[in-house]
Image (cartoon, rainbow, N blue to C red):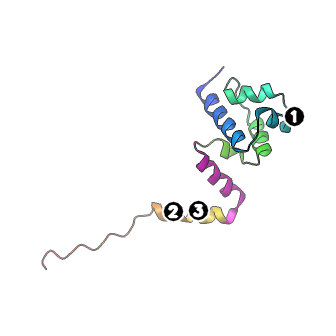
Amino acid sequence: MRTEVDIVIGKRLSQARRLAGLTLRELAERLGWPYTTLGNYESGRRSLPVTRLYAIAAALGRTPSALLVDTPEAAALVDVIASDPERAIQIHFVLETLESDMPKAPEEDAAG
């Protein structure tokens, strides 16, 4: 049964494949799958099992989680964070800093 999630994930897979410069047939060949199977995942006609998500990610040189986020920019960040623990710590620090309350400017003396 085709669901909205299957369609969204399929579009993300298709986009990641195209960004990698691969045709449907080329990626299917790397995976050792019939191209129709991959096409069914990309179109959302079939639900993508997690084991297949991992296989596709590996064939594209990506992390599986990068194929699940909304934008290519977010996917690139996920790949960087997953592949470089030091960079992950740096990004975490920056995000924590952005989330903390900024010090308030001193109020001007109203009596003055």
Relative to the observer, which residue lies in front, 24 or 98?
A: 24
Q: Which residue is mark 2?
A: 96
Q: Secondary structure at mark 2?
A: helix
Relative to the observer, which residue lies in front, 19 or 7?
A: 19
The amino acid pointed to by label 3 is: Ile
Image vertical order of residue 19 relative to residue 112, above or below: above
Identify the residue shown where x is 85% and y is 35%: 29
Total tally of numbered discs in the picture: 3
Distance from disc 3 to disc 1, alpha carbons, whole Å, reads 37 Å
Relative to the observer, which residue lies in front, 76 or 99?
A: 76
Image vertical order of residue 103 relative to residue 82, above or below: below
Identify the residue shown where x is 46% and y is 60%: 99
Q: Which residue is mark 3?
A: 91
Label 3 vs 2, first from the N-terminus:
3
Front: mark 3 or 1: 1
The amino acid pointed to by label 2 is: Glu
Image vertical order of residue 34 relative to residue 57, above or below: above
Q: Which residue is mark 1?
A: 32
Identify the residue shown where x is 72% and y is 40%: 17
| Helix, strand or loop: magenta stretch | helix
Tag 3–tag 2 contact (CB < 8 Å): no
Q: Secondary structure at mark 3?
A: helix
Tag 2–tag 1 contact (CB < 8 Å): no
Residue 43 image point, x, y percent: 67, 27
The C terminus: image quadrant: bottom left
What is the magenta range?
Answer: 70-86
Q: Quadrant of residue 40?
A: top right
Q: Is residue 105 magenta?
A: no
